[in-house]
Each structure stands twice: as C-alpha cells, then as structure tokens.
Image (cartoon, rainbow, N blue to C red):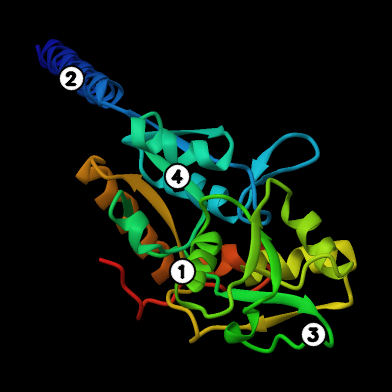
Amino acid sequence: MKKITKIALSFAAVLAVTSLAACGKSDDKDKTSKSSSAKVTEITVGTAGMPKPFTYKTADGKLTGYDIELAKKIDKALPQYKFKFEVTEFPSVLANLDTGRFQLAANNFGYKAERAEKYIYSDPIAKNPGVLVVKKGSDIKSWADIAGKKTTSETGTTYSNSLEEFNKTAKTKVDFTYTEADLATQLQQVSDGKLDFKLQDLVSAKQIIKESGLSNLKVIDITGERDNPNSYYLFPKDADKAFVKAVNAQIAKFKKDGTLKALSEKELGGNYAPDDSITVK
C-alpha cells in the first residue's frame, strides 16, 4: 500500500513539474511574441558623405566618420528605432528633411539662427570651432582681416552664411564665390596662393592639411570672434517628439559616460566633446 502511495505521489509530482514547465514555456512564448510584435520605427539618416572625418566613405565604400559612428551607437541603444543611412548631395540633405524623407541629418552641422527656424537642433555632439586656414606668413591674423580677401565656400553651409553676414556690414567685402570643390581642393588652392584663406572647422582643416602634406598652411583660431563652436544633428521641424527626446537622452548619456570623448579621440584625433555651456534651445 505504501509503495502504491509513493508511486502515486511521485506521479503527481511529475505532473506538477511538467505543468509548471509548460506554463513557463507558454509565458516565455507570450513574452517573445509581445517583444517581436513591438513596433520598430525606421529612421532614414541623411548625409552628404563629407566632410571627412565626420562623414565619409572608406576605400571599400563603407560609410563612416564621427557623426555616422555616433548615430550607429544611438541606433543600437534605441531598440524601438532602426536607422538606415542615405548619402546624397549636401543641399539635398536639407531638402529631404523638408519633405520628410529624412528623419535625421548627420553632417557636421554648425549652428545657424536661420536654420533653427526651419529645423530642430539636437543636443550638441561635438565641439568643433571654426578657423581660418591661411598660408604661413599671411597678413590675415584675425576674423576682421578677411576684408578684401579671396575665398570660396560651399552652398548652404554655416561658413558660407558667416561670409554672407560679414559682407552685409563690412566696408570692404570678402571676394568669395560658391564652389562644389571638396575641401582638399580648396585648401590646395590656398596653399598655391589662388585663395587667400578658407573658413572651415578645426577638425576637418587639420586632418586635410596633415593628409595632403600642406605644410605651408596654418590655422587661426577665431573662437570668441564668432558664436557657437558646437556641432549637431538636425531633425525636421515637425519631428516626432518622442524620437527627438530619445536621441537627446542618449547623447546626454554618452557625454556623461565618456563615449563622446572616446569616439572623438578615435575618429577626430582628440577630445572634442561638446561645450555644454552653450545652448541653442
């Protein structure tokens, strides 16, 4: 009798364990189902693929650079979004933000008040002040000295805007024309004496000078003579608020945990973590 009772109890225990296991599997299945059914929003990130080292393609066609690699890290940290990258000409980056084709733009964007009226700026992602690139021995020593000098600039950039603003009030205007030439070509023209100076960001200028061996060029720091040295991502004006908030929260987290510092040292060659004392909101 005792033996029969023990067998019955053992059988009951097996049934209980099997039942619990089945319930566990069912719960796991439900959780997996809920997880897999969670909505993932696709985000198209637009970039011009220049200037290097913020956004560019490697010899084998891989899109990389500081702005791009940071965006990839943000994407990885936000499972509710999936980023895809699209390369186009610089003016089209902004145009596609206007139409809604792009939900984020990554292109070493400096701050422009006029641009802030049309787009939402992210929190700053890097500190990258503007500089004047000139030949060693040039009589250009400061921002004021560019009056009457010759240069070129790309359409729609922070730097072309700065030159336009300078000419609005200057007694002697800067002689500048728009160009589609890349930065390396423009700096070569400064080196050859065809241009007097080039207004550019510090990081890009230093890298091209080094890579191209333009040892007769130097950079003049004009921090303090112009406004905001930080760079940003751009969102459309009607961007989803939850997306903007999520991206900015991740940027803040990366600033706090040292990710921005480490990434800038790797991609930009130094600590270019943003200056938090400057706000554009």
Looking at the picture, which amino acid does disc 2 mark? Cys
The residue pinned by badge 3 equals 138
Q: CA distance from mark 1 to mark 4?
A: 24 Å
Position of 115 with respect to 45 (left or right) is left
What is the x, y in percent for residue 8? 13, 12
Q: In the picture shown, does residue 133 fall above or below 232?
A: below
C-beta proximity under 8 Å, tags 1 and 3: no
Residue at position x 54%, y 53% from top? 67
Q: CA distance from mark 4 to mark 3?
A: 36 Å
**Please, what secondary structure does the residue beneath circle 2 have?**
helix
Q: Quadrant of the N terminus?
A: top left
Q: In the picture shown, does residue 200 fall above or below 83?
A: below
Residue at position x 41%, y 64% from top? 111
Q: Give whichever of 226, 144 is nearer the camera.
A: 144
Q: CA distance from mark 2 to mark 1?
A: 70 Å
The residue pinned by badge 2 equals 23
N-term mark: 4 or 3: 4
The residue pinned by badge 1 equals 165
N-term mark: 2 or 3: 2
Position of 164 with respect to 115 (left or right) is right
The residue pinned by badge 4 equals 105
Quadrant of the image occupied by residue 42: top left
- Mark yes or no: residue 129 visible: yes
N-term mark: 1 or 3: 3
Residue at position x 62%, y 84% from top? 221
Crowding near pointer 2: few (<14 within 10 Å), some, many (20+)? Answer: few
Crowding near pointer 3: few (<14 within 10 Å), some, many (20+)? Answer: few
Q: CA distance from mark 2 to mark 4?
A: 47 Å
Q: In the picture shown, does residue 22 fall above or below 279?
A: above
What is the x, y in percent for residue 209? 81, 68
